[in-house]
Image (cartoon, helix red, strand yellow):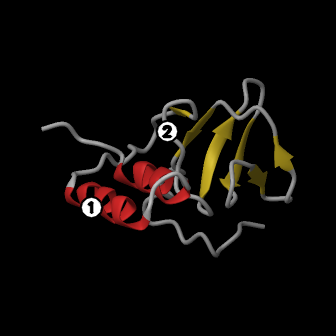
Amino acid sequence: MRRIDANAIRDEVLNDNTYDNDTVNYYLGLIDAAPTIEPKRGEWIPVSKRLPKRGEVYLVANGSTIKTAYLDGGYTWVDSANYILRYVTHWMLLPEPPCGADMREVEK
């Protein structure tokens, strides 16, 4: 069985205005029934192959810089200072916090 990125395909079908409602509902049913591929932590994913869920924070790279950023409602990457990042080539899930660490505590 071939596994797919059902979330990415679902987004494409919903954003494509060339299909009528019956066709969209048919494809959404097929997509929902298919297994999906989840990204692995520590794995860089090219944006040319797959985009992440919109609105969640990821590590992103543009060839010279690595930052945290999220993908807005379109195809724009925005960093924590609300600057638009250009030429993002790869993204990855954020790592898990250190085991036993309380991220609310900051050492002085």
Could you tell me which residue is drawn at 44 percent across and 66 percent down? Answer: 100
Where residue 90 sits in the image (x, y, percent)?
A: 60, 33
Report crowding for label 1: few under 14, some 14 to 19, many 20 or more residues within 10 A (C-alpha).
Answer: few
Residue 24 lies left or right of residue 18; in this view the side is left
Residue identified by numbered label 1: 32
Side (left or right) of 106 relative to 85: left
Above or below: residue 98 compared with residue 47: below
Label 2 and label 1: CA atoms lie apart by 18 Å
Q: Mark 1 or mark 2, which is nearer the start of the sequence?
A: 1
- When the figure is inspected, residue 68 is found, relative to residue 61, above or below; the finding is below
Q: Which amino acid is tagged 1?
A: Asp
Kindly identify the residue that appears in the image at 46 percent across and 39 percent down: 42
Q: Looking at this rendering, what residue extends furthest in the top direction?
A: 63
Query: Which image quadrant is residue 106 in?
Result: bottom right
Residue placed farthest to the left in the image? Answer: 1
Q: Dot 1 lies on which element?
A: helix
Q: Position of residue 67 (x, y in %)?
A: 73, 44
Task: Report the amino acid beneath label 2.
Answer: Arg
Where the C terminus falls, by quadrant?
A: bottom right
